[in-house]
């Protein structure tokens, strides 16, 4: 009888000292939800994604009508690539350089008045200024082309992150104001696990700690998540504090917005 009592006490001591994981309710959320809008106001020409579609960062998801902007770009590009003003100015310089040199030679021999020499030199100097102006105008045209191209690009709307389309707020043919939301995208890799733990566990939870997550049916299964945020402001009403964990979901097999259970050790 005494031996049985000692054995029971020993087992109880092992359980008390070993520590164990407790299970808590949690929620699986997207790690990011973004509303995509247009930087420009205008009429929607096309939206290339639907609710439930997977998108990748940088993917074109919508376009605004941009006929006028395309014409403006074509015009700016034509000006930027037109070299005729520079060629004309250079040809004029070549001609006037010869005439100015000839006038100087004749002036040195007193065959023409000094006024003729000064006029020829002045015309040559003016031609140099005209060439510089033509070169300056070409640089301005190149900058204008860049500006107009950027304006046109702003009428193409791209996904800022990998994710899944969860809402489409507007359709083709509708007018949209600048910054008004068009599409909502949720990033589900990774997922965030949100859980509230009792305050007596605050010193037991550490950044980087791993925990087991069990999604509710019909997903099910058992997955490992990593602690990435620990609230340092308690909820006095519930005597709890929030913890966020990261759950990698590279294949997109897990869904967001579902209840789960989490086991985290003490």
Image: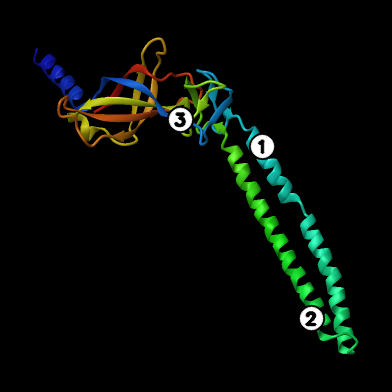
Between disc 1 and disc 3, whose residue precedes?
Answer: 1
- Reading the image, the residue beneath label 3 is 180
Measure the alpha-carbon separation of dots 1 and 3: 23 Å
Q: Nearer the viewer, mark 3 or mark 2?
A: 2
Quadrant of residue 45 within the rendered picture:
top right
Q: Is residue 92 left or right of residue 45?
A: right
The 10 Å Cα crowd at callout 2, few under 14, some 14 to 19, many 20 or more, is some
Q: Position of residue 73 (x, y in %)?
A: 67, 41
Q: Quadrant of the N terminus?
A: top left
Residue bearing the label numbered 1: 70
Neighbour tally class for label 3: few under 14, some 14-19, many 20 plus, Cα within 10 Å: some
Where residue 214 sits, quadrant-wise, is top left
Do tag 3 and tag 2 residues touch (Cβ < 8 Å)?
no
Can you say whether 123 is above or below 65 in the image? Answer: below
Q: Which mark is residue 118?
A: 2
Q: Position of residue 182 (x, y in %)?
A: 49, 26
Q: Residue at x 77, y 57 (%)?
A: 85
């Amino acid at each position: 009888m005494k031996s049985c009592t000692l054995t029971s006490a020993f087992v109880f001591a092992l359980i008390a000292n070993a520590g164990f994981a407790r299970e808590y309710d949690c929620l699986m959320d997207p790690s990011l939800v973004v509303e995509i809008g247009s930087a420009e106001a205008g009429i929607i020409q096309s939206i290339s994604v639907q609710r439930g579609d997977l998108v990748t960062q940088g993917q074109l998801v919508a376009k605004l009508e941009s006929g006028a902007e395309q014409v403006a770009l074509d015009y700016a590009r034509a000006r930027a690539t037109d070299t005729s003003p520079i060629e004309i100015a250079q040809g004029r310089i070549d001609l006037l350089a010869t005439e100015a040199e000839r006038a100087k030679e004749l002036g040195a021999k007193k065959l023409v008045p000094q006024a003729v020499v000064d006029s020829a030199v002045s015309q040559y100097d003016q031609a140099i200024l005209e060439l510089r102006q033509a070169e300056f105008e070409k640089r301005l045209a190149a900058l204008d082309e860049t500006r107009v191209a950027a304006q046109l690009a702003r009428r193409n709307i791209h996904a800022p992150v990998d994710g899944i389309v969860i809402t489409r707020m507007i359709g083709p043919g509708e007018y949209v104001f600048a910054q008004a939301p068009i599409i909502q995208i949720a990033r589900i890799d990774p997922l965030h696990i949100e859980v509230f733990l009792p305050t007596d566990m605050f010193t037991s939870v550490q950044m980087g700690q791993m925990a087991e997550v069990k999604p509710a049916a019909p997903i099910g299964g058992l997955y490992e998540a990593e602690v990435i945020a620990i609230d340092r402001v308690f909820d006095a009403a519930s005597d709890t504090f929030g913890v966020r964990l990261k759950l990698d979901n590279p294949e997109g097999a897990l869904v967001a917005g579902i209840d789960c259970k989490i086991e985290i050790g003490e």
